[in-house]
Amino acid sequence: MRVVLDTDVVVAGLRSRRGASRAWLRAVLRREVEIVLSVPLALQHEAVLLRPATLTAVRLTRPEVGRFLDGLCGVGRLVEISFLSRPLLRDPDDEMVLEAAMAGCADRLLTFNLRHFRGCERVGVKAERPGPAWQAWKGRIR
């Protein structure tokens, strides 16, 4: 299984020790699933995670966030965006998430903002919320 995690899923996974977002992060770090990353997407994850409010919410220090992101990048599949599909979506920040999913042939783009990714199925990308996607994936591997 190859996934792209929208930044909201990464933040949710670090905020809570329970839940599907945390389960996806664990699965990625254990290499049970492959995460697709692009440089713009990794930089977006970093920028959001290092915001003072986010640091407080996830209860991590800047160095701890750096180590987490190094781990994510260390296990991830880095893809190069050699084309821009824009504009397909309304938000430019969401475009880079979709482009990573397209370039990496991701099976799922996991996000809490499904309405932001409306129409991505036209380019062969399936956007899903982390919870239902986790249940479906775990059901298949049992």
Image (tube, rainbow, N blue to C red):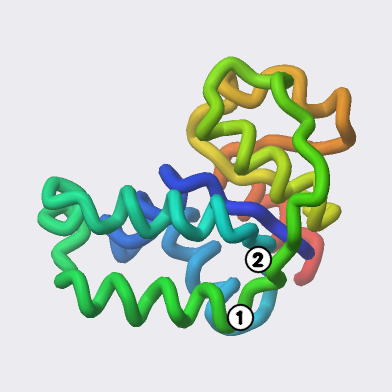
User: Are there few (<14), some (14-19), or many (20+) residues within 10 Å of tag 1?
Assistant: some
Percent position of residue 22, x then y: 43, 62
Specify whether residue 19 is in view.
Answer: no
> In the image, which disc is placed on residue 75?
1
User: Are there few (<14), some (14-19), or many (20+) residues within 10 Å of tag 2?
Assistant: many
- Please tell me which residue is depicted at 47% across the width and 81% down the height of the picture: 71
Q: Is residue 48 left or right of residue 109?
A: left
Secondary structure of residue under mark 1: helix
Q: Is residue 96 above or below residue 120?
A: below
- Place residue 73 in its image quadrant: bottom right
- Depth check: give the residue in front, 135 or 22: 22
- Please tell me which residue is depicted at 55% across the width and 52% down the height of the picture: 40
Q: Is residue 100 left or right of residue 75?
A: right
Do labels 2 and 1 touch, CB within 8 Å?
yes
Q: Is residue 86 left or right of residue 52?
A: right
Q: Is residue 81 above or below residue 27?
A: above
> In the image, which disc is placed on residue 35?
2
Secondary structure of residue under mark 2: strand
Percent position of residue 120, x then y: 76, 27
Marked residue nearer the N-terminal end (2 or 1): 2
